[in-house]
Each structure stands twice: as C-alpha cells, then as structure tokens.
Image (spheres, rainbow, N blue to C red):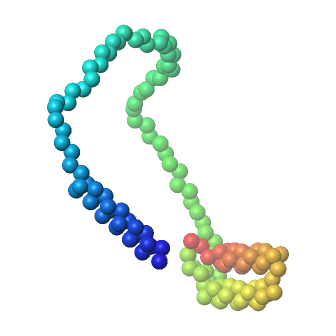
Amino acid sequence: MKTSNAVLTGLAVAVVVAGLAWAIDVDVSGETKLPSVDVEMTEGELPAVDVETVDVDVTSGEKTVTIPYPEVDVQHEAGAQDGVAQEDDIEKMDERMEEMAEDAGDATAEGMRETADEMDDAADEVDDHTSY
C-alpha cells in the first residue's frame, strides 16, 4: 500500500513539473557579458629544506646458495598406508563420536566443553594413524 502511494505521488509530481516546464516561456534579449576581474599576483617563496639521506651502495653478482633437503623417515603402525585412514580407524572414530553424542544429550556448558575436548582427542587418535 505504501509503495503504490509513493509511486502515485512521484507520478503526480512528474506530471506537474512537466506541465510547468511547458507553460513557461522565457525570452532573453541583449548580450551576456561577464564581469571583469583584475588579478594581481606576486612571486611566492618556497621554504628552505635541508635533507640528509643515507648512502646506499648497491652491487649485483651471482651467488650460489645450497638449499638443504631434509630426509624424512615416516614410521607407520602395522596396516597403515601413506595418507589413507584405515576403515577400522574410521569405524572406531564413528563409534566414539556416537558415544559422545549420547553423552552430550543432557549436556551442560561444561559437558559440552568436555565433549568437544573428547572429540578433539578422537580426531587426534585418527591423525596418529594417518599421514598426509
């Protein structure tokens, strides 16, 4: 309702403005002349500035840099594969998370914090058996 009133009001204003523009006739006679302006300027003066900069010597050349390549020996528990979580690890984590969800059924703020900590611990256990 408010939108239609605003549209009708805007339309009415546009019609009135258009009617006034059509009804007004302006005739201009004579030449237009700008006023003369006399501008007088004097020289300005910049302030004295004393700047002390650092002396920088820049040289270029070739340099050989040895980048160490670390050797990493990853030890896996029996049955673990690189970057792949084992199915039994995932099942254990699912079971643990279901237990925690049941425990959290009547959770208070403290209980929720403990549950979150337990979930972090469970995720860490899976990470211990998985490499990325």
- Residue 77 in which image quadrant: bottom right
- Judge whether 66 appears above or below 5 on screen: above
- Along the viewing direction, whichever of 85 and 76 lies nearer the viewer: 85
- Residue 72 in which image quadrant: bottom right
The answer to whether residue 114 shows anywhere in this view is no
Residue drawn at (31%, 58%), measured in percent from left and top?
Answer: 17
Is residue 121 rendered to the left or right of residue 22? right
Is residue 80 rendered to the left or right of residue 41? right
Is residue 49 rendered to the left or right of residue 44? right
- Along the viewing direction, whichever of 53 and 19 lies nearer the viewer: 19
Is residue 91 rendered to the left or right of residue 66? right
Residue drawn at (56%, 60%), measured in percent from left and top?
Answer: 71
The answer to whether residue 35 shows anywhere in this view is yes
* Residue 106 screen position, x and y as percent: 81, 87
Residue drawn at (72%, 78%), measured in percent from left and top?
Answer: 119
- Judge whether 13 appears above or below 127 on screen: above
How many numbered dots are placed on residues in this image?
A: 0
Residue drawn at (62%, 76%), measured in percent from left and top?
Answer: 130
- Along the viewing direction, whichever of 120 and 111 lies nearer the viewer: 111
- Judge whether 35 appears above or below 24 on screen: above
- Along the viewing direction, whichever of 17 and 106 lies nearer the viewer: 17
Q: Quadrant of the C terminus?
A: bottom right
- Judge whether 119 appears above or below 42 on screen: below
Residue farthest toward the left in the current orientation of the protein: 30
* Residue 131 screen position, x and y as percent: 59, 73
